[in-house]
Image: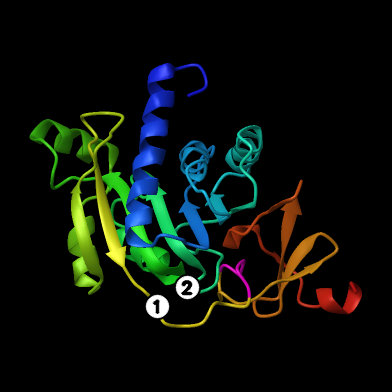
């Protein structure tokens, strides 16, 4: 993106359009999560359009991508962003943790896992879930063949309706990187009435609070510790190390 003006312009356009959409849904969100943040290209261009302070979060399965995202966001003067590793199937965050949750082609390669991923994304959203993902149903026959070959998702809207989610919009998005992989936007309204959670990062298995002790995060529920590597919490279930007596030895 840094060396390709076309790619850079695309990300700028996506960020601008996404901010317009978020503003139309809820003018002053307090928190936002990008699930599957990659190197932070989309989030950085989105954050530049917020006039009021907002706390942003992002996770990816790869520590290295998170490290690149941290450097990129810092270079773009994007502050108040919390980054960590995590899995779409077991998001290490509390219920209703974020006003806005969104994805940008993060669910894409997970055909067959649409329902559990949607359920996890919906769980951590408080007001709206916005999905910028390829649409099999709105694509051409050539595009569908390509999506079949790559194992890209299908039936996302059908899955959301099956889960009885309030889908307020589903259509092709204004911008897409590849015409053979058309991006659609799906907006799901949640508007949870529950109070703000007392914690954000959570045990990825039980979704319960973590305790920071000696640069690791300890879960009293799973009895595991999760490492923090160069300031980045590693919160995939497989990152957990069994340490049932950790609290007895570290104070």
Q: Which residues make up the magenta segment?
A: 199-204
x, y percent for residue 189: 30, 68
**Which residue is rendered at x = 19% and y = 54% of the image?**
170
Magenta-drawn stretch contains 202: yes
Q: Secondary structure at mark 2?
A: loop
**Which residue is rendered at x = 55% and y = 51% of the image?**
59
**Residue 112 visible to the viewer:** yes
**Residue 155 visible to the viewer:** no
Disc on the earlier residue, 2 or 1: 2
x, y percent for residue 75: 65, 32
Q: In the visual, does 72 lie left or right of 158?
A: right
x, y percent for residue 245: 81, 78
| Number of other residues with Cα within 10 Å of mark 2, as a class: few under 14, some 14 to 19, many 20 or more | many
Residue placed under numbered mark 1 in the picture:
192
Which residue is the extreme one toward the front?
A: 51
Q: Residue 190 occupies which quadrant of the picture?
A: bottom left
Q: Residue 116 occupies which quadrant of the picture?
A: bottom left
Q: In the visual, does 150 lie left or right of 83?
A: left
Q: Secondary structure at mark 1?
A: loop
Q: Which mark is residue 183?
A: none
The front one of 216 and 241 is 216
Label pair 2/1, CB-CB below 8 angstroms: yes
Q: In the visual, does 67 lie left or right of 86?
A: right
**Which residue is rendered at x = 64% and y = 37% of the image?**
77
The front one of 208 and 17 is 17
Magenta-drawn stretch contains 198: no
Q: CA distance from mark 2 to mark 1?
A: 7 Å
Q: Which mark is residue 96?
A: 2
């Amino acid at each position: 993106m840094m060396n390709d003006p076309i790619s850079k312009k695309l990300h700028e356009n996506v960020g601008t359009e996404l901010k317009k959409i978020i503003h139309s849904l809820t003018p002053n969100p307090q928190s936002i999560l990008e699930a599957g943040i990659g190197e932070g290209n989309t989030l950085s261009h989105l954050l530049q359009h917020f006039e009021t302070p907002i706390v942003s979060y992002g996770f990816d399965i790869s520590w290295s991508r998170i490290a690149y995202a941290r450097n990129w966001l810092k270079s773009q003067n994007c502050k108040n962003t919390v980054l960590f590793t995590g899995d779409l199937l077991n998001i290490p965050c509390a219920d209703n943790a974020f006003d806005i949750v969104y994805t940008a082609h993060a669910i894409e390669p997970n055909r067959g896992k649409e329902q559990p991923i949607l359920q996890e994304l919906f769980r951590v959203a408080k007001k709206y879930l916005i999905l910028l993902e390829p649409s099999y149903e709105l694509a051409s026959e050539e595009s569908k063949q390509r999506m079949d070959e790559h194992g890209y998702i299908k039936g996302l809207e059908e899955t959301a309706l099956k889960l009885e989610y309030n889908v307020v919009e589903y259509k092709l998005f204004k911008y897409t990187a590849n015409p053979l992989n058309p991006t659609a936007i799906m907006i799901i309204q949640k508007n949870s009435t529950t109070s703000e959670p007392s914690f954000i990062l959570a045990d990825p298995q039980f979704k319960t609070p973590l305790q920071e002790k000696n640069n690791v995060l300890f879960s009293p529920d799973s009895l595991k510790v999760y490492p923090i590597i160069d300031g980045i919490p590693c919160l995939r279930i497989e990152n957990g190390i069994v340490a049932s007596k950790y609290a007895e030895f570290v104070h």
